[in-house]
Amino acid sequence: AQTVTQSQPEMSVQEAETVTLSCTYDTSENNYYLFWYKQPPSRQMILVIRQEAYKQQNATENRFSVNFQKAAKSFSLKISDSQLGDTAMYFCAFMEAQAGTALIFGKGTTLSVSS
Amino acid sequence: AAGVIQSPRHLIKEKRETATLKCYPIPRHDTVYWYQQGPGQDPQFLISFYEKMQSDKGSIPDRFSAQQFSDYHSELNMSSLELGDSALYFCASSLVSGGPYNEQFFGPGTRLTVL
């Protein structure tokens, strides 16, 4: 069974600084997807960024980028120029590359951005 | 753009009562997923449906059942409610045949409180 581990329960950063959230996963699959979701106090689940396992190039979305190390089964999220609105719970998630399969989430990292 | 609709948004029930949660996927999406998120927890996959057939099953209690109807909306039926069923229930939808990501779009959730 696949597992996702986020080893940092809480992180804090000041505005405009850069922060990196860690995520490791375990799978025997070769083809899969990885995601970072943001859950602000409103509890809405918002997709931040996604990565296909077959792509070597790291995904980027504006201030958000990932460091995907397939051999090490590592998938970290870097947030540059942190903003107060980035304050949220961040979940790393894994999904097999099969139709209709579930997302498997890590336990989450609470990120606090202060001014 | 249309999003996933969940109703009701809030629900309060007594122990041993029954609850029905409804989910209306994004138009043309063919797959629906249900997740349960307890307080301070990560979302846990319950069940999914593709083209009205169950496609994947997670840690869904036997007291719960779900189905997807001909118009693609889905209902999660929960009977003999327990205090531990108090949680945020997310529905997500995706278009399985629509691309490589099978991205799941989340609804706002239904907050169930069991007293």
Image (spheres, grey):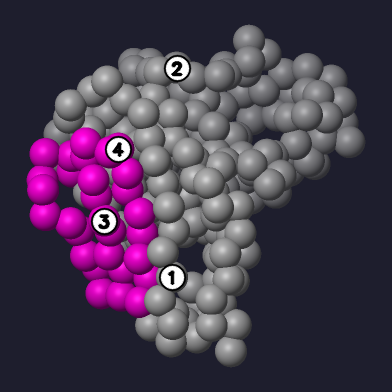
Are the two marked residues, 1 and 3, in contact with CB atoms closer than 8 angstroms? Answer: no
Q: How far is the residue under mark 4 from the one under mark 3? A: 11 Å
Circles 2 and 3 on the same chain: no
Numbered circle sitting on residue A67: 3
Q: Earlier in the sequence, mark 1 or mark 3?
A: 1
Cα–Cα gap, marks 2 and 3: 31 Å
Labelled pair 2, 4 in contact (Cβ < 8 Å) = no
Residue A19 got which mark? 1
**Which element type, helix, strand or loop, lies under badge 3?**
strand
> Cβ–Cβ below 8 Å for labels 2 and 3?
no
Instruction: Judge whether B112 appears above or below B70 on screen.
Output: below
CA separation in Å, label 2 and label 4: 25 Å
Crowding around mark 4 (Cα neighbors within 10 Å: few <14, some 14 to 19, many 20+) is: some
Q: Secondary structure at mark 1?
A: strand
Residue type at mark 3 is: Asn
Q: Position of residue B25 (x, y in %)?
A: 38, 42
Q: Comparing marks 2 and 4, which lies closer to the viewer?
A: 4
Q: CA distance from mark 1 to mark 3?
A: 13 Å
Name the residue that disc number 4 marks. A73
**Of the pair B63 and A18, the residue shown nearer to us:** A18
Residue at image coords 18%, 43%:
A52
Indicate which disc, 4 or 3, sits on the residue closer to the N terminus: 3
Magenta span of residues:
A52-80
Name the residue tied to disc 2. Answer: B57
